[in-house]
Amino acid sequence: MGRKLVILLVGLVAFGTLSAQQLFFDGELSTHFDNTEYTGSGIGDSRTVFAVRLIPTLGYRFDEHHSVVVGAELLKDFGSSRFMDDTKFVAYYQFENDKYGANAGIFQRSKLVGNYSRAFFSDAYHIYNPLVQGIAMRHTGSSAFVELVVDWDGLYSPEVREKFRVLVSGGGSFAKIGYAGASFSMQHFANKSTFQGNVVDNLLLNPYIGVKFNAFFDFDIRLGGLISAQRDRKADEGWTLPAGGELYFKMSRWGVYIDNNLYVGEGLTPFYHTIGKDGEPYADNLYTLDPFYGTQHKVYNRTGIGYCRAFASDRVKIKAEMALQYDGKKMYCQQLVAISATICPTLYDKKNHKR
């Protein structure tokens, strides 16, 4: 087996050498601060995420549209005594042309083009889970896009539940200022190898329609629905169907913005406190959304005031925000700061000349 693997690798290298066109480095360094003051809400604890993340990769483009990339994702929590708190392997194939794109392997979540709100993924989830393990396929046109993603993020084993998610997102623009679309998530939260009969199905659909226009300020106004279907097969009580409506508003200029997100409906995390067969609550292992969407008071409002700009040909990005979150009973606070820098120099051109 080992001999066959060596022969295969030698063949790939030989093929790549014959058709080599470009060798490039892609590096992203980002610092994230996310302070949440949620104690007393019943849907999450206060915590402070303060970390630096480095994703260095080396890519090999063997013709105009095809690339193979390898690297690592390195995470260091500030104040930790460890040299590195988390290290993950990055390796993927990428196809890209003017209209179509695809990734297969372990790649950065930033490569996705879909519109996934905080009802799908929280800010903290993006910090600690920046990689997709699976495949992503997309089509982008002048006024529309569609994307399909399969993300396998839990290995069936004694330590970890089997978990995977299918994402579909699509949308387009119309009448100069209008846009519409929908995003869908199907999450399969299954068993560990030490037990059976504890599968949870978690489906979420987010159709939306909105307008974007400029009247001295840039405005973005969007109305959507959040429709969920969830089932805990351990309890065998059928499907739970929490749903609600969402109104989003944003006004910005010179990088300064104020936005407001109002959700009215049922809590989207009915099994958050359920204890599984392994004795552990489902909690954040099942739900990746902003925990306030689990409100038990049928209303959630988030108001953010911040600054977000890109500099140096979009290679340096800065975002700072203060957010007030209301769960229908009490106000809570969140502070966010994110600074990132990316570089992507070409090391060799298609004629193998050093740049």
Image (cartoon, rainbow, N blue to C red):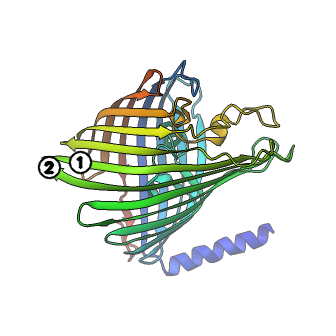
Classify mark 2: residues with Cα within 10 Å, few (<14), some (14-19) or many (20+).
few
Distance between the Cα atoms at labels 1 and 2?
Answer: 8 Å
Q: Amino acid at mark 1?
A: Phe
- Let me know if residue 309 appears in the view: yes
Q: Secondary structure at mark 2?
A: strand
x, y (%) of residue 259? 31, 38
Vertical placement of residue 338 versus 62, above or below: above
Three-letter residue code for mark 2:
Ala
Q: Which mark is residue 219?
A: 1
Q: Are marks 1 and 2 in contact (CB under 8 Å)?
A: yes
Give the label on residue 215, or none.
Answer: 2
Residue located 66% across and 54% down the image: 164
- Camera-side residue: 187 or 130? 187
Where disc 1 sits, the SS reads strand
Q: Nearer the viewer, residue 296 or 79?
A: 296
Task: Please provide percent x and percent y for residue 76.
Answer: 52, 34
- Residue reaching furthest left? 216
* Residue appearing at x 81%, y 36% in the figure: 278
Taking the spot 74% from the left edge, 50% from the top edge, the residue there is 162
Which is nearer the eye, 323 or 70? 323
Quadrant location, the N terminus? bottom right
Q: At which x and y percent is residue 290?
A: 51, 37
Q: Quadrant of the C terminus?
A: bottom left
Quarter where residue 25 is shown? bottom left
Please name the residue shown 69% across and 74% down the image: 8
Total marks placed:
2
In the image, which disc is placed on residue 273?
none
